[in-house]
Image (cartoon, rainbow, N blue to C red):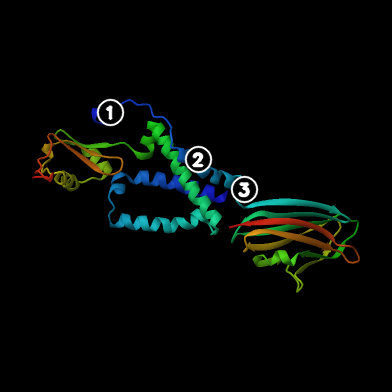
Amino acid sequence: MKTELFKTPEIPPRIKAWKYQLIGMPLLVSIPILALLGFLGGTTKKIELNERDLNISLSYPELLRNGQTEYVRLKISNTSTGPLKNLKILLSHDFLQQFDEIESLPEFDKNLEVSLNEIPENGFRWVLFKLKANKIGGHSAKVEFKLPGQDAIETAFKTFVLP
Amino acid sequence: METVIRVAAIFAFLTIALRIIGKRELGEMSGYELVLIILIPEILSQGLIGEDFSVTNAIIGVSTLLSLVLINSFLSYRFKKYRNILEGEPVILYFKGKLMEEALDKERVNLDDLLNEIREIGYERFDQMKWIVLEPDGKISCIPFSPPRTNPEGEFIS
């Protein structure tokens, strides 16, 4: 039932705001936009390495939030003409100490190294490091790949943990 | 990113759900409605922030919620149709001697509630009312034919 009771004067509504709102509102709205664009954590980055007989694809969390669990994923492919044996992977201890509940797949040995017994010709293996962010700030990591009788292949990355 | 989507989805769901349950339920809380209001956040809290209890995630969640409120407030101010969809329109429950039974049924307003509202403004009968309207915020407005009688202190005299 529409009646004169609900009739309002015709004043066109205009969008206006106080000065402090003009500054504060875009700031407020920018936070979810930044989060959607990945500037507030949850982003991963990828490194590709092609050295000697190995093709390594490493993805790591670039920006994490404190308490968040993320993975460093390694896909190690054998590009040689024969099988690769006894490959050892070491993620720097300084880096691991910045995290909680560290796990790896395959499991670490007592030196916190991951060993891959054999990667067949043209084959590949996955290695996962599970990390739970514990300390706020930037943490640098170094990853070494050691094959018996050869110099280690190294790469590095940096992860930043937000509060 | 996940938090923004979670908060936006739950905000939309709650806005629609609260709109569906109707004005009366929002205007006055009965016992079971109070239980609902206490239980809903318990159920939704996990859905809102997941397992991420970081300060950053909390700030993202709150700012997403406030941004949605802000955007809705601008849209409902600027566009009347949007405001009507979001907040609802006033509903006439009584007009010049006639009770709008369909509206009373749809909004689940009983006559005892109406009489209660009439008494609160210092009147005693329906026939003293010109309009009784259920407002979008759930409150009932009673508009009498003549102003109520008051004593010099402004208190109602029945």
Confirm whether circles 3 and 2 share one chain.
yes
Residue A39, numbered label: 3
Q: Is residue A10 left or right of residue A126?
A: left
> For the residues marked 3 and 2, what is the alpha-carbon distance in whole angstroms?
21 Å
Picture quadrant of residue A51: bottom right
Q: Amino acid at mark 3?
A: Phe
User: First in sequence: mark 1 or mark 2?
Assistant: 1
User: For numbered disc 1, what is the local secondary structure?
Assistant: loop
Query: Which residue type does callout 1 highlight?
Result: Lys
Q: Position of residue A13 (x, y in %)?
A: 39, 29
Tell me the mark number nearer the camera, choosing from 3 and 2: 2
Relative horizontal placement of residue A152, taking residue B37 as reference (left or right) = right
- Find disc 2 in the rendering and name its residue: A23
Residue named by callout 1: A7
Amino acid type assigned to the residue bearing label 2 in the image: Ile
Which residue corresponds to the image point at 35% horizontal and 26% vertical from the top-left? A11
